[in-house]
Amino acid sequence: MDRQHGSVIWFMGLSGAGKTTTARHVAAELLQQGRNVELLDGDELRETICKGLGFSREERIENIKRIVYLAKLLSRNSVDVLVSAITPYQEMRDYARSELPGFVEIYVQCPIGECERRDVKGLYAKARNGDLRHFTGVSDPFEVPQSPDIVIDTASASLQDNSEAVIGWLHANLRFMHAAQRA
Amino acid sequence: MDRQHGSVIWFMGLSGAGKTTTARHVAAELLQQGRNVELLDGDELRETICKGLGFSREERIENIKRIVYLAKLLSRNSVDVLVSAITPYQEMRDYARSELPGFVEIYVQCPIGECERRDVKGLYAKARNGDLRHFTGVSDPFEVPQSPDIVIDTASASLQDNSEAVIGWLHANLRFMHAAQRA
């Protein structure tokens, strides 16, 4: 049996930027291509393997380390892993890249004004009221990614276009995609 | 691509009973048979996804929940998962069985006197001295498994014999093993 390596396609950006929405769309497309796919959602992981971790710099780094650990176990068993997590510090991205052979860094760009206008989970309002401390973009930094593989913008482009851009990049850059197509 | 389900072969028993040793031996055999295998060691997981959890009843249950979560993600992606963890309460085993389609419960039996004589990690000595609280078998209960699929005894049987017993059971009881042999 082939133990082919999967990719780890990591969507990072502000809360409300559209990370999970885009990741779900890309995941559905990869599934349709017959690949093994898991989507790891940062919010959901905070209820499972990251339960109890807060939002200090140290805890955020521990949070990302656990996601990397999980992504590593899955990807080395032929699973394409999509991660949706704010991942606010450059140090985290460098760590993920160093640990994960199939790492693909996607910066999901969106002006904070637009994220705040959407405010799907009502978190920006809470952060502005002071009810949420350490909130990325408001009271905690988001360091702009220094060397993302792909940048998408969810304010100026559609979900469809962004997903196609990601899939197109994967096809062009990852040998595994071609292998899967040939099979 | 086939998304075949893997097994979750769960080794439970006292500290020093030989859970990890047996699991490693079985894992090597499954690997040789060309399967995707991951061994999740309870001690190691306490340094990663279970970091910071203590040994109260509540924290032990949370610890097992996280291992189940990880085993589920892997096994549904065709990975055979071997777990090595004390798993002292029946409630945990019932939970694991209810969550994991390919669950196989192995009770690694060994008299506590023999575990204590081995005391590979020096933990029994610490527990007897009172330097370790909530230590299974000394100051925390180990409930004898009510319905294990396999029982092995590491005091009276050799590692080789026990591993063969496990592999033999898997071959006889799990359809997937035959499927793999035919492939």
Image: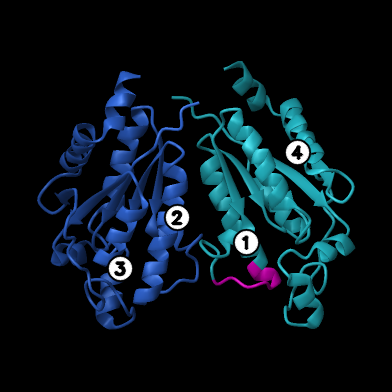
Chain colours: A cyan, B blue
Please identify the quarter of the rendering in which residue A30 is found. Answer: top right
**A129 shown above or below A46:** below
**A180 shown above or below A121:** above
In terms of secondary structure, where does tag 3 sit? Answer: loop
Residue A81 or A57: which is nearer the viewer?
A81
Nearer to us: label 4 or label 3: 4
Mark 2 vs mark 3, CA separation in Å: 30 Å
Mark 4 vs mark 1, CA separation in Å: 21 Å
Q: Are marks 4 and 1 in contact (CB under 8 Å)?
A: no
Question: Which residue carries the number 1 mark?
Answer: A43
Q: In the image, A9: left or right of A140?
A: left
**A81 shown above or below B53:** above
For disc 2, the neighbor class at 10 Å (few under 14, some 14 to 19, many from 20) is some
Q: Amino acid at mark 1?
A: Asp
Please identify the quarter of the rendering in which residue A37 is found. Answer: top right
Mark 3 vs mark 1, CA separation in Å: 39 Å
Question: Which residue carries the number 4 mark?
Answer: A163
For disc 3, the neighbor class at 10 Å (few under 14, some 14 to 19, many from 20) is few
Dot label at residue B122: 3
Q: Does the magenta segment cover residue B141?
A: no
| Whether labels 4 and 3 share one chain | no
In terms of secondary structure, where does tag 1 sit? Answer: helix
Q: How far from the left and from the top, in percent, is residue A3?
A: 49, 29
Question: Which residue carries the number 2 mark?
Answer: B69
Q: Would you say the magenta stretch is mainly helix, strand or loop?
A: loop
